[in-house]
Image (spheres, rainbow, N blue to C red):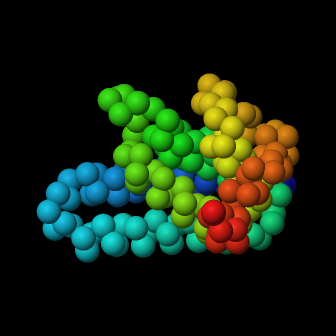
Amino acid sequence: MLHYIRDKTAVPYFSNLVWFIGSHVIELDKCVQTDEEHKNRGKLSDLVAEHLDHLHYLNDILIINCEFLNDVLTDHLLNRLFLPLYVYSLVSPETSEERKINPQVSLYLLSQVFLIIHYQPLVNALADVILNGDLSVFSCQPDVHSTHKNTCMLGCRHSTILLNVFRGDVALG
């Protein structure tokens, strides 16, 4: 029964949810890029608030602590949103066609991810990629049916420090 729920409901739902959030992020970025005279401030404020609502919703799902749902959602978030859209936008060259959003927007959105999402396997894996610069995650897509413990439970000391800095638990120099 759990396999049916995961495969027939959770996977399509989370796939659509992550796609929707990604589309929303691209719209937010376009609003930032075209707002030269700060005429879209109200629309931008609404888009940011909606994105923060999405992150809180994702966190609410993750803190339910249903392992098979968390595995599916973590996989979708890392491999279809955070890494290819947020992180890759930070590391690709300015002129690259592959960069999807502005690096400053990406950095802001990543900071919000670290402030709002409290699911350690997800934030540790994301911080590990950012701090260690291991971009191999862009070339392989893990199987949705495999457990995420091997790829997400990195427990890196650096990711814990980064998480604490983003949350304000540690002050920088």
In the image, is residue 157 above or below residue 169?
above
Residue ID at (54%, 64%) = 112
Q: Is residue 35 visible?
A: yes
Identify the image quadrant of the N terminus.
bottom right
Q: Position of residue 82 (x, y in %)?
A: 57, 48
Please report the residue visible at 68 percent of the width from the left and 56 percent of the height from the top.
162
* Image coordinates for residue 62, horizontal then vertical, percent: 72, 64
Residue drawn at x 40%, y 67% is 48
Question: In percent of the image, x 19 and y 66: which residue is there?
Answer: 38
| In this view, 140 is above or below 104 | above
- Residue 143: x percent and y percent? 74, 34
Q: Residue 94, position in %: x, y?
A: 35, 34
Quarter of the image where one finds residue 173 = bottom right
Q: Nearer the viewer, residue 158 or 138?
A: 158
Does residue 5 appear in this view? no
Residue 9 vs 148, above or below: the answer is below
In this rendering, position of residue 146 left or right of residue 103: right
* Horizontal side, residue 43 vs residue 170: left or right: left
